[in-house]
Amino acid sequence: MGFSDHALDRPLIAIVNSWNNICPGHYNLRELAEYVRVGISRAGGTALEFGTIGGCDGIAQGHIGMRYILPSRDIIANSIEIMMEAHQLDGMVLLGSCDKIVPGMLMAAARLDLPAIFLNGGPMLSGFMDQHNPWGGTKVDSSINAEAVGLLKKGLITEEYFLELENTSCPTCGSCSNFTTANTMCCIAEALGMALPGTAMIPAIDAARRRVAEEAGMAVMELMKRGITARKIITKKSIENAIRVSSAIGGSTNVALHLPAIAYEAEIGFDLEWFDQVSSSTPFIAGVIPAAQWDVTDLHKAGGIQAVMKEISSLLHLNVLTVNGRTLRENLKKAKVKERRVIHSFKSPISKTGGLAVLKGNLAPRGSVAKPAAIPEDVRYFSGPAQVFEGEPMALKALRTGKIRKGSVVVIRYEGPKGGPGMPEMFWFMKILNGLGLAHKVALITDGRFSGSNNGCFVGHISPEAAEGGPIAILEDGDRITIDIPNRKLSVHLTASQIKRRTTLWKPPKPKITKGYLALYAKIASSADQGAVIKVRDER
């Protein structure tokens, strides 16, 4: 391959690249890899590149492909482990941008405990919408196409306008311009200290994105020289910081799946009670689509994640180490909030409690997850009769044929890690519901999950899931269900004896998929409250 003895005498640093031209968020990673290569070489290393898979949640919506997205996270982590261990490389720069790729790469970093740094490709710019904009401004992200289905069905927009949105809502490469899981996890990487300060939300097309790619290549060499490995950065304290940042920005509910998985790989204890305690004691200070009219580029211009962390610094562990070799305290000295309409002050937050909440009760004994930042205040307490569906396709059919009743709590079950299998997002149902103007009048609960772009009254990650015989499995049409987000409760109005009687009559359904990776994942995945991770350690 033409390597000189001199090149092979230097540290061998992997560029782990999830580039493909399927996923818009990863389209620019091939170019960024070249800048990383320059940085590694300049700092005295030799770069060796290999690829991983990287799926797009947006393209995978509404069909069987969505069931593969969460399980791909573990495949990504495993593939990185295999390549790094098989070839005994010395360190790595991880290039990714989208939903499950970012946590998969961070899981691998924690597992391998080598010098490692994460670099994302950056978010795309927003599209434009000046009619019936659900966020209240003129900016929209790629998920507006799903919302627009409901608007079109109601006659609020024309088919011509709908097609225009379809062609312009995703105007550049990059991860979607809102707080989907992609951008949330890129922000989490920075909050953990695994990405260079101030880099998470630099737009994909910005020249600064190339400059920080070169800087990342140089930074990983410095980590190696100083013996700083991933587990010296990913600690209990840095994970707590990440939870607080996610809460402060109203990040995706999928954080409650991915942070436990990263913690598991780092051999750090994690439970949803701790997650809720940290989240509920953190103010929500930075609203971005779907919680406000601003996009993540606005957040970057306002000071980015460093400014958010500076604002909530009294709640953070400031002596944790980051990938530039400095402590968080040192990094935040230069941070400054530049736009108060986007990043509110600690003393005058958007709300006093964080953007995520864990709900428990007789319907979710081990917990469930909601996103108050994306739930209108008037429906944060919602009580109504259940409309029960055995999977998202049946619920979507009922919605499209006008059979979803106002005031009801829609139950979509058998969509958890085992039952889905793969725990798909209930993205389309919530988007069309919102487009139809029903987001304030209908609630949704599920053992599946949601996109960070969803809004309305929704609760996901119900554990135990239906496939494990959790209480959600024994619900019937008409059962009264109460969602009480302020008091962190999710309950069905049944007595303990009624629940027990129904449970004894319950029988698990036949598996939906009996071949391939999804069949294997359904057998070995842990429950949502444990991050849906594939566990390998005996924790008895």
Image (spheres, rainbow, N blue to C red):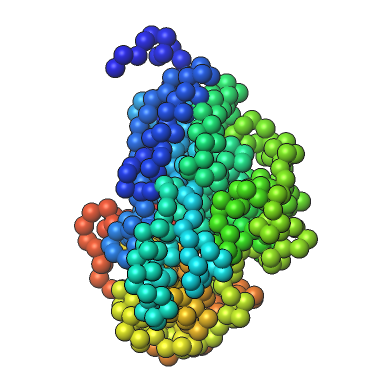
Residue 355 located left or right of residue 164: right
**Residue 318 in which image quadrant:** top right
Picture mark count: 0
Q: Nearer the viewer, residue 512 or 498?
A: 512
Q: Is residue 380 above or below residue 280?
A: below
- Residue at image position (61%, 52%) is 299
Image quadrant for the N terminus? top left
- Residue at image position (35%, 32%) is 50
Does residue 378 appear in this view? yes
Image position, residue 161 (x, y; %): 38, 69
User: Furthest-bottom residue in view?
Assistant: 478
**Residue 7 in which image quadrant:** top left
- Residue at image position (55%, 46%) is 201
Q: Nearer the viewer, residue 60 or 281?
A: 60
- Residue at image position (56%, 69%) is 136
Q: Is residue 471 above or below residue 300?
A: below
Image position, residue 207 (x, y; %): 52, 36
User: Furthest-left residue in view?
Assistant: 515
Image position, residue 301 (x, y; %): 62, 48
